[in-house]
Amino acid sequence: MKKFTILSLATVALMFTACGDKEKTTEATVEAPVAVEATAPVVAEVTAPAAGSDDAGKTAFAACAACHGADGKLAALGKSAIIAGQSSADLLTKMKGYKAGTIDLTGNGMLMKGQMANLDDAKMEALATYISKL
């Protein structure tokens, strides 16, 4: 214990000594302001696909592909039915049920509820239409 205490005190003493030895030799320099011409900012316009288009469904499906596969032909987490090719009406009913938290077909109801939370009715319709065509 004495060695530890002596070593600790020596370390602290060196730290304080080293901090006090430094001379402050920083010089402040001031540069003259540079004139800058005002230009119009470049703004890239990003538009989301229309909710009823296949592009909107494809865009929304990107989040689904992680579990259901890029073509919708994968049983999500080894539990779900294949969603590719199901009728859009059936898919839409399931999506709305998951969003409302009223269905849980394979034990993934809470996961699906979270996935559907950010989709409005138009996006769900576009997604259901897209999946039905896979």
Image (tube, rainbow, N blue to C red):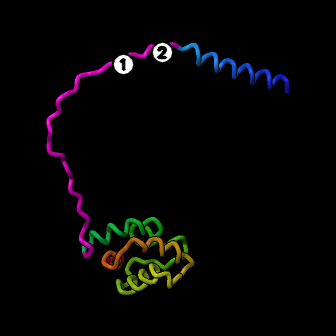
Span of residues in magenta:
23-52
- The image quadrant where one finds the C terminus is bottom left
Q: Which residue lies at the image location 47% right of the left edge and 80% below the top edge?
A: 98
**Which residue is under mark 2?**
24
Q: In the rendering, at what x and y percent does residue 103 appear?
A: 51, 84
Residue 69 in the image: x percent, y percent?
Answer: 44, 68
Q: What residue type is labelled 1?
A: Ala
Q: Mark 1 points at which residue?
A: 28
Q: Distance between the residues labelled 1 and 2?
A: 12 Å
Decide if residue 90 is on the left or right side of residue 75. left
- The residue closer to the viewer here, 2 or 75, is 2
Asked whether the beta carbons under mark 1 and mark 2 sit within 8 Å of each other, the answer is: no
Relative depth, front residue between 107 and 71: 107
Q: Position of residue 52 (x, y in %)?
A: 25, 76
Q: How many marks?
A: 2
The overriding secondary structure of the stretch rendered in magenta is loop
The reply, left or right, for residue 45 in relation to residue 116 is left
* Amino acid under disc 2: Lys
Dividing the picture into quadrants, the one containing residue 125 is bottom left
Where is residue 107? Give x, y as percent. 57, 78
